[in-house]
Image (spheres, rainbow, N blue to C red):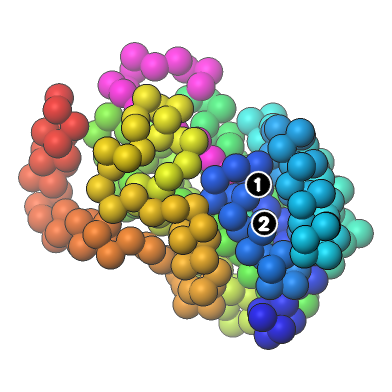
Amino acid sequence: MGDFAERYGPVAVVTGASSGIGRSFAVQLADRGLDVVLVARREDRLRALADELRETRGASVTVLPADLADPGAAGEILEAVAPLDVGLLVSNAGFGVKGTFGEGDAATLSAMLMVNCEAPTQLAHGLAPRLRRRGRGGVLFTSSVEGLMGCPYSAGYSATKAYVNALGEALWAELSPAGVDVLTLCPGATDTEAPRLQGVDPTTLQDLMSPDEVAHAALEHLGGGPTHIPSAHYRNLFDTLLAMPRRDALAAMARSMGK
């Protein structure tokens, strides 16, 4: 734990910290001796989590309510953390929508691009030079196995996560020589609010992992980038799909959605 805090501390910025994997990241980072900056829209949840981390872990916690769909949000976060010695960025916030492309709400699609792509890019752009100067630290992006190939009926979300995967791989190659670790986390089915918001009962999903399991796996593999898929089931599934002719793989995925 001491080695982890020395390498990635003293302060971690966690987006999407009000629930799910982001909340698990915040708790586990505090357990590992880091102070945390909690970023999410729901201020009441952030403040409750901050109180918990202060009381039970003795962590110093900063609460930054922000809607990452707002074009100015990333800049405001960077300005707020400028006085802090940030050693780790956990860019975890994100959301997705399912369904036939073109039938969904265009404004929701735009917001998803902002949250899933624009905000991680701007936060990493603002913090990477600081991490490079420190000669240690890390950047952790939460992506998805759906970013490994275009997923029918999840087109927009899949495309945003493909962007995150490419960004993370490129930054891993750029920053590793400077002593900065970069990991792109690609979870499969995880028991969070996200499936429910998309009308899916998480208990019907294969190889469902808890947010705590996913966050723990990511932190354990932070130095082993560029990409980590914590679920053996989804590693094997996408190894199989990616080995197939792309037309056949995409057709098989479309059929599996019952379309």
| Residue at the disc numbered 2 | 26
- Residue 28 appears in which quarter of the rendering? bottom right
Determine crowd level at label 2: few under 14, some 14-19, many 20+ residues with C-alpha closer than 10 A: many
Mark earlier in primary sequence (1, 2): 1
Q: Is residue 30 above or below residue 117?
A: below
Residue 90: x and y, percent? 63, 57
- Residue 124 appears in which quarter of the rendering? bottom right
Q: Is residue 75 above or below residue 211?
A: above
Please state, as top left, top right, bottom left or bottom right, where the C terminus lies in the image. top left
Please state, as top left, top right, bottom left or bottom right, where the N terminus lies in the image. bottom right
Front residue of 122/32: it is 32
Residue at (34%, 50%) from the top-left corner?
A: 208
Marks 1 and 2 close (CB-CB < 8 Å): yes
Residue at (51%, 58%) from the top-left corner?
A: 212
Q: Is residue 83 visible?
A: yes
| Residue at the disc numbered 1 | 17
Question: Of helix, strand and loop, which one carries label 1?
Answer: loop
Question: Of helix, strand and loop, which one carries label 2?
Answer: helix
Residue 248: x and y, percent? 8, 45
Magenta part of the chain: 93-108
Residue 143: x and y, percent? 46, 51
